[in-house]
Amino acid sequence: MTISFKEKIGYGFGDMASSMFWKIFGMYLLFFYAKVFGISPAAAGTMFLLTRIWDAINDPLMGIIADRTRSRWGKYRPYLLWFAVPFALVGVVTFYTPDLGENGRLIYAYLTYTLMMMVYTAVNVPYASLLGVMSPHPKERNILSSYRMFFAFVGSFITFMLLQPLVDFFAGLFDAGAAIVFDATSISRSPAGWTAAVAVIGVICAALFFLCFKLTRERVKPVNENENTSIRQDLRNLARNAPWWILMGSGLAALLFNAIRDSVALFYFADYIQISYKMPVLGWTVATIYLLVGQAANMVGVALAAPLSNRYGKKKTYMVAMGLAAVLSAFFFFLAPHQIAWIMTLQVLISICAGYVLPLLWSMYADIVDYQELKTKRRATGLIFSSSSMSQKMGWAFGAALSGWLLAWFGYDQMSAVQPDSAIFGVRLMLSWLPAISCVLAVLGMMFYPLSEKRVKEIAGVLEAWRTKSCVKSNKSVRA
């Protein structure tokens, strides 16, 4: 069974939508809270981490609900339709800045950010699970995962391309007389500009989710489709799944690498590089160009993921990519503000490695679904893929929280235009050595991952035989 090109594109649209908002959260939210909303980096960092406690329950719960969903559209596709509009609306509310006191602003941030992550879970966990039921073939899933991640980086690229010019445009439209509006070294700090810009991105996201719903199909049926397994048994099976634990740990470290770099990028350019330049017509700052270069390089990495992993194996190529990212990240610490060419070059090389790794993680989660079905006769696709969503959010939360705490510890003052040397040192550290350490941890974890390419193929063959046998028995029963 071969998935059509149109369906692969449709599946990619789903993560294109998710990624457009996810990159706003990862790259801009800490900056927005500190520079626009007036929340200290330490308070924002603590909020990011505390809200993940609820996600530790919410993500697996959503996976369990999706696994038990019955509709004419399948188990997982309906959520793309039901939550497309709420996804966009809550995103806009998150970037709205009501006139409240310091405590009121913090409470508002907690409430809206928690709600945003709940809606994100409601659409993204079923979307991720869709990969496990579109095709039973590991190589086909590698390709689907690559399409997914390629379009995710296309979405990120569009976000970076549009958001800063949109914020600046709406800032000029709504707050033309405000002193905080235009800053040649970074994005505008106009509250109205941010809200309107995110609203435009939200409309695009909702449209992409609708297209993903329309163009995709669910095909893989569980071996024991009619068997009602208890939630407790599903959780017990997952707790005994050793490859899942290993991949969770390694994947968390890989996502932590991305999260730390993403969280401090704007601070790095606004406070360390400080180059006053905006591209004519498009209005991109050096920071925006840096982000765009990174996303373009991510797409190159994604394009290489399927052919190279199909040839050399996912585990081996994952470890090589993360090892290279560790070495390259460490070099970032030694760059001076005027070495823009080197900054962009390292960004390209590191982003290729990151782009290569992410689709492998999603494809390996699909392999773990097969492994658990082989061991337990139960296909808990949504539950297992919810763990990947949870690790993604936990990795970003830990990275953002650590970044916020470290900024405060190094003496960063969000209300000051000039930062002390200690704060600049901290920003440089968080864009270099800390991500490098995370890469090393990811490599160490992957060394213990037991599902080789040979083993994955064996499992897929056994499950295919079981399904064929089950289908034959079902047909005989109908004829009888």
Image: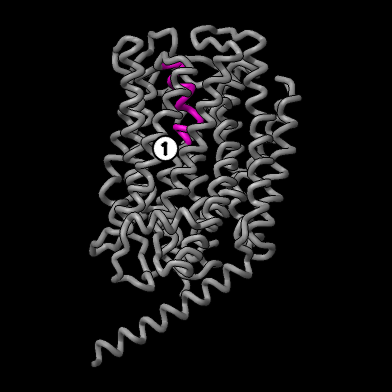
Q: Which residue is drawn at 43% across and 7% down?
A: 179
Up-down relation of residue 105 to residue 205 (above or below): above
**Would you say 468 lies left or right of 479 here?**
right
Quadrant containing the C terminus in the rendered view: bottom left
Q: Name the residue under label 1.
A: 21
User: In the image, which residues are magenta?
Assistant: 23-36
Is residue 433 visible from the viewing direction of this image?
Answer: yes
Residue type at mark 1 is Phe
Residue 272 quadrant: top right
70 or 88, nearer to the observer: 70
Residue 212 place in picture, x, y as percent: 36, 55
Is residue 199 visible from the viewing direction of this image?
Answer: no
Q: Callout 1: helix, strand or loop?
A: helix
142 or 343, nearer to the observer: 142
Residue 251 place in picture, x, y as percent: 56, 46
**Would you say 228 lies left or right of 277 here?**
left
**Would you say 50 lies left or right of 420 here?**
left
Up-down relation of residue 40 to residue 348 (above or below): above
How many labels were placed on the picture?
Answer: 1
Circle 1 crowding by C-alpha within 10 Å: few under 14, some 14–19, many from 20? many
**Would you say 350 lies left or right of 401 here?**
right
Q: Which residue is drawn at 41% across and 13% down?
A: 38
Judge whether residue 27 is colored magenta: yes
Residue 275 quadrant: top right
64 or 112, nearer to the observer: 64
Residue 206 place in picture, x, y as percent: 32, 44
Residue 333 quadrant: top right
Residue 50 place in picture, x, y as percent: 41, 28
Q: Residue at x 35, y 23 (%)?
A: 109
